């Protein structure tokens, strides 16, 4: 897979906001409708960003990886990843999301792009219980991955539990129920990093007995946990006790040098012998440098991620509080 070259941006996305909807238009003609980030609705459909851009650009640069494949997009939201796979020649896609509004977006996005009804299925359900009729060749996943202090509700799109891995762990637990032995999974995650390694590495290393796994960091600079706690403090001024407790518990469990980093996990086909699990700094050549998470400004990145767990009050509520 590695070419040693920086991948070109083949998606060339432009976006247009119309009221509370956002339309992304890609160079290959695909259009995806989502909603604005600050929509005051707990069931909002997230706009597209770095996670979707990097995975889509990978798909378009390596179309053999999707052509003719049966694809599963759990945590589908608007379905951008699965629809890009269809556009690149996938045979069909099953979308799964617990939010019933996601299914409306799958229908609308299917219609916007003239996909046929038999090319995709939208399932409203929980990843913990979903039983597929058949295993898939390819899984494309962007689960809720934002770590959040216990006691804060967070959002359906982003609450990944106190270490951010709640949903990726369910997906990994159930991977062999979803994925063909010859299949591959690409999963975008956000991880606490301890002594240079994401917490999920131990778990993935155990899985590498049967499948080779590569982890690619998708940001240049690690985000200090402190700047992330500061962001939560600004967004949730009434939750200082919960935030302080979360911070001290994590430091106690993992040491005070904790940082955060985004990664793409690439889980390959089953092999006869033991596979390997490795972290590789190959983002530019595998996904395209343009899609690196901008991480120079720690405060901004911490705030952007913590914001995903915040639903802005409606103007009516704001008025009532005044
Ligand atoms: C980070 S968003 C994914 C966004 C998506 N990749 C997109 O491009 O729109 C996570 C999604 O997971 C869904 N979700 C949350 N809990 C879930 C669960 N238990 N089972 C399935 N989907 C779930 C949310 O509704 C949300 O749409």
Image (cartoon, rainbow, N blue to C red):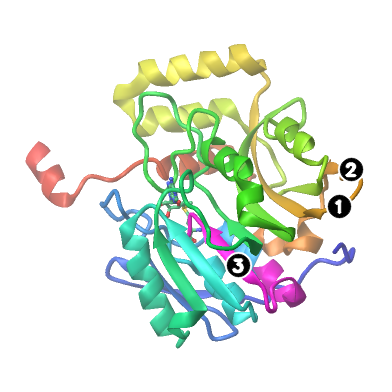
Against 104, residue 39 (above or below) is above
Q: Can you identify the residue that label 1 sits on?
A: 271
Q: Is residue 175 above or below residue 88?
A: above
Q: What residue sits right under mark 3 in the picture?
A: 71
Q: Are marks 3 and 1 in contact (CB under 8 Å)?
A: no
Task: Give coordinates of residue 208: x percent, y percent.
Answer: 80, 41
Question: Residue 129: image x %, image y %?
Answer: 46, 46
How far apart, in angstroms, are the residues tagged by discs 2 and 3?
A: 26 Å
**In the image, is residue 66 part of the stretch drawn in magenta?**
yes
Asked if the residue at label 2 sits under 8 Å from ligand 1, the reply is no
30 or 122: which is nearer to us?
A: 122
Locate the N terminus and report the quarter of the image it occupies: bottom right
- Horizontally, residue 280 falls left or right of residue 308, namely right
**Residue at the spot 59% in from the left edge and 83% down from the top edge:** 27
Q: Secondary structure at mark 3?
A: strand
Q: Are marks 1 and 2 in contact (CB under 8 Å)?
A: yes
Q: Which residue is mark 2?
A: 274
Q: In the rendered view, tell whether residue 222 sits above or below residue 140.
A: above
Left or right: 260 as drawn, with respect to 303: right
């Amino acid at each position: 897979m590695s070419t040693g070259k920086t991948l070109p941006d083949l998606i060339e996305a432009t976006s247009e906001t119309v009221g509370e909807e956002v339309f992304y238009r890609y160079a290959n003609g695909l259009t995806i409708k989502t909603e604005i980030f600050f929509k005051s609705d707990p069931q909002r459909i997230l706009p597209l960003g770095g996670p979707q851009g990097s995975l889509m650009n990978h798909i378009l640069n390596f179309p053999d990886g999707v052509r003719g494949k049966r694809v599963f997009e759990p945590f589908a939201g608007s379905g951008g990843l699965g629809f890009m796979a269809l556009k690149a020649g996938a045979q069909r896609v099953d979308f799964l999301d617990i939010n019933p509004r996601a299914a409306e977006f799958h229908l609308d996005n299917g219609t916007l792009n003239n996909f046929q009804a038999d090319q995709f299925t939208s399932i409203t359900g929980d990843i913990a219980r979903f039983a597929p009729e058949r295993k898939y060749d390819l899984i494309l996943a962007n689960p809720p991955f934002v770590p959040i202090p216990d006691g804060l509700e967070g959002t359906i799109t982003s609450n990944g539990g106190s270490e951010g891995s709640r949903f990726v762990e369910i997906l990994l637990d159930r991977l062999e129920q979803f994925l063909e032995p010859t299949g591959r999974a690409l999963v975008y995650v956000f991880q606490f990093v301890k002594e240079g390694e994401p917490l999920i590495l131990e778990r993935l290393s155990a899985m590498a007995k049967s499948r080779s796994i590569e982890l690619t960091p998708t940001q240049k600079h690690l985000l200090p946990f402190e700047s992330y706690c500061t962001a939560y403090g600004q967004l949730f001024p009434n939750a200082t006790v919960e935030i302080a407790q979360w911070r001290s518990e994590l430091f106690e469990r993992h040491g005070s040098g904790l940082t955060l980093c985004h990664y793409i996990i690439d889980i390959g086909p089953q092999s006869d012998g033991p596979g390997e699990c490795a972290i590789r700094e190959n983002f530019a050549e595998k996904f395209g440098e343009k899609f690196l998470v901008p991480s120079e400004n720690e405060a901004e990145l911490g705030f952007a991620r913590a914001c995903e767990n915040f639903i802005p009050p409606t103007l009516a509520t704001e008025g009532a509080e005044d």
